[in-house]
Amino acid sequence: MTYEQLKHLKPSGFKRKCGVYRDTFEQMVELLRPDLERCGKRGGQNKLSVEDQLLLVLEYWREYRTQFHIATSWGLSESAVCRLIQKVESLLMASGQFRLPGKKQVAENAYRWSVLVVDVTESPIERPKKKQRAYYSGKKRRHTLKAQVVVNQANGQIICTAFGKGRVHDFRLFKLHRIPLLPEQLCLADKGYQGITNLHTLSCTPTKKRRTAKLDSSERQHNRLLARLRVVAEHVNRRLKIFRILAERYRNRRRRFGLRFNLIAAIINFELALPS
């Protein structure tokens, strides 16, 4: 289905098909047009328009079909699809418009990011040929890649990310990629971050049940209130995994996983800033 067929869909239908809003799609097209449009230039001419080239890449992220199946759908070679996907990803990242703020901005924007939520999501991968144990996640009982996201609790903006192998514990991943939090910034986390108060005093995690006794009413109330605040990070994970390349078993080379994760996260941030 080409862009000429898709552009007549309702906004909700366009979002369901492509994973992004029409305004986001048009902005991405304008960024890509100078590099992807070859009309009148020497050399081979593009078989697809700029809109269709971007649509192909979004289809790959959104549906995560094999590049062979996408190539047969669009009438291209499998190698051409691979080159196009990597080219579009690199151009969008290099444009600077689809980038995360980064952890260096945490302290500088403390007045806006006063409450932060830290959470980890995992993406399954194919069983590695070497060093399988390093990627095996006991929690998911399969080989995974972990991605830590730091989210602004007020509006769900993704501030920064960090990546690790499936065997790395959530709290260890946090300690390896220290976030420069100011003392007045509140950090909310789940049970996987027990002990975070030793690193950042103004932190809050759920109260764990003791082996010999149940939680009292005040502790249960604390956990419920914390869950209501932390649910923002769970909504962010849901938005990320609308793109099935992050939700299903990742078949590509692992070294490009972080770039794709950050790019999709930046697109989500871009859409949060769009006028409703």
Image (cartoon, rainbow, N blue to C red):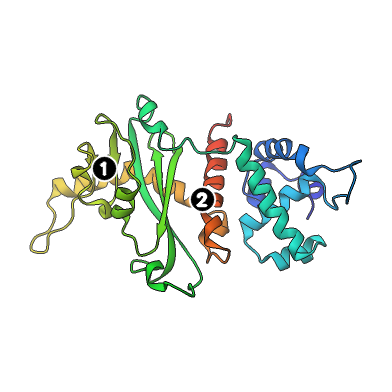
The N terminus sits in image quarter: bottom right
Q: Disc 1 designates what residue?
A: 225
Residue 240 disc label: 2
Q: Tell me how many marks there are.
A: 2
Could you tell me if residue 19 is visible in this image?
yes
**Residue 195 shown left or right of residue 241 in the figure:** left
Q: Is residue 132 above or below residue 185?
A: below
How far is mark 1 from mark 2, CA to CA?
25 Å
Closer to the camera, 117 or 220? 117
What's the amino acid at mark 1?
Leu
Q: Circle 2 sits in a helix, a strand or a loop, which is it? A: helix
**In front of the other: label 1 or label 2?**
2
- In this rendered view, identify the residue nearer to me: 222 or 163: 163
Please tell me in which quadrant of the rendered image residue 26 appears: top right
Q: Is residue 109 visible in this depiction of the protein? A: no
> Which is more toward the observer, 156 or 82?
82
Looking at the image, which residue is at 56% across and 51% down?
A: 260
| Neighbour tally class for label 2: few under 14, some 14-19, many 20 plus, Cα within 10 Å | many
Identity of the residue drawn at 56% across and 63% down:
253
Looking at the picture, which amino acid does disc 2 mark?
Answer: Leu
Point out residue 66 in the picture as x, y percentages from the top left corner. 66, 66
Q: Position of residue 77 (x, y in %)?
A: 79, 64
Q: Quadrant of the C terminus?
A: top right
Q: Is residue 260 above or below residue 154?
A: below
Residue placed most toward the observer, 226 or 36: 36
Q: Secondary structure at mark 1?
A: helix
Residue 24: assigned label:
none
Rendering coords of residue 21 (x, y %)? 64, 41
Which comes sooner in the sequence, label 1 or label 2?
1
| Residue with the most extreme bottom position | 129
